[in-house]
Amino acid sequence: MPAEAGPRITIALDAMGGDHGPAEAIRAAAGLSLSRRDLGIVLVGDEPLLTRLLAEERYDPGTLSIRHAEGFVPQGEAAGSGLDARPRASILEAAAVVASGAADALVTAGSTGAAVHAAARRLGRIRGVRRAALAAVYPTERPHGPREDPFALLLDVGATLHCDARDLVTFAVLGAAYARAVSGNESPRVALLSNGAEPGKGPDEVVAAHGVLSRGGVCDFAGNVEGLDIPKGTVDVIVTSGFVGNVVLKMLEGVAELATDLARDAYARRFLWRLGLTMLGSGLRQLQELTDWSQYGGAPILGFEHPVIKAHGRSRAPAIANACKVAAKVARQHLPREVERALARVQDAIEGLPAKGRSAGPA
């Protein structure tokens, strides 16, 4: 991939996170050092181990460096206590590298909870943002936007489980800004997830957020959408609470896995079905490529002063490299300042909204 215009962007890469350990992060960083001279990578983790693994790869030493860290928070362990027990954990050290100005963005394939907590401890929130949002990129039935984007954004999916109206309005601003930065869509359409399209449908916080967003000045607001609209691609960004978003995301993942299992079972059992699936082979391959999370780089954790990208825990080197490219792209767009300006335009309306709910997460 050719270098992008502008100064070099440096990524702090948590090399210890992920199901496959530091070897895949090392391969990703080594490959990027040769193909993207506009990127710098700070590998954060066990320095002796990373040095030994890096020596086995071909790379440009002018774009890579190592920052020592001690330990990491395993998947499934409580994030807060896990970080308390490991004050020099790799995700905390990576966030500290960004906070110091030595890197512009953070990428990890490790624990989502640890990433959210580490960012909260080391990276300041954007002015006007009270709570972070974890966004998920998901495939849509039809391309949309000026670039015919086959993906849309759903947030929050687990960083803030219980949201009030102010949080939902803020998430709308965050989601729209991220869509502009990554997809190049100057006016992404944003909707609230509810149980009906009418403005008065949904819980109190959704109705109140609808009232603010519909006044204009925040984003290109499309109103409410229902669950059945999520895969259709009628909007670019869908906003909901972390609890609902996490349930929706896991349901979508479960349906995709079920469809794959049914197709595999049908292929094994019936000759006619096997023949039909063979004839549909190219279409199924396109669907597989479309739903391949390794292609779109990971999930952004939005709301902090610097980009934080959470790559999938099962990420191999290509997926981690894509996550680094996405992080660099967002870092070049100065997204925090754009969010600040958008929130300032509706600050009075947001302050007038009732505060309700509590923060918890991630799911």
Image (tube, grey):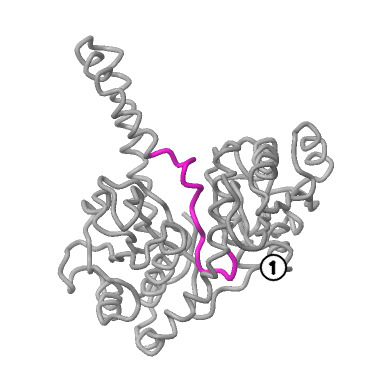
- For residue 117, what is the image quadrant? bottom right
In the image, 291 versus 122, the foreground residue is 291
Residue 37 falls left or right of residue 304: right
Residue 236 percent across, percent down from the top left: 32, 59
Q: Is residue 313 left or right of residue 153?
A: right
Name the residue at the top extreme: 271
Residue 103 lies in the magenta stretch: no
Relative to 216, is 328 on the left or the right? right
Check the image and report above or below for 34 versus 158. Answer: above
x, y percentage for residue 228?
21, 51
For the residue labelled by badge 1, is the local secondary structure a helix, a strand or a loop? Answer: helix
296 vs 92: above or below: above
Task: Please rate how many residues cluster around mark 1, counting C-alpha atoms within 10 Å: few if below 14, some from 14 to 19, many from 20.
Answer: some
Residue identified by numbered label 1: 99
Q: Nearer the viewer, residue 249 or 344?
A: 344
- For image coordinates 57% across by 59% down, the residue present is 308
Q: Is residue 302 magenta?
A: yes
Callout 1 amino acid: Ala
Residue at the spot x=54%, y=58% of the render?
Answer: 329
Residue 286, compared with residue 226, is above or below; it is above
* Left/right of residue 62 with respect to residue 123 in the rendered view: right
**Over which residues does the magenta segment extend?**
291-306
x then y, percent, for residue 224: 22, 66
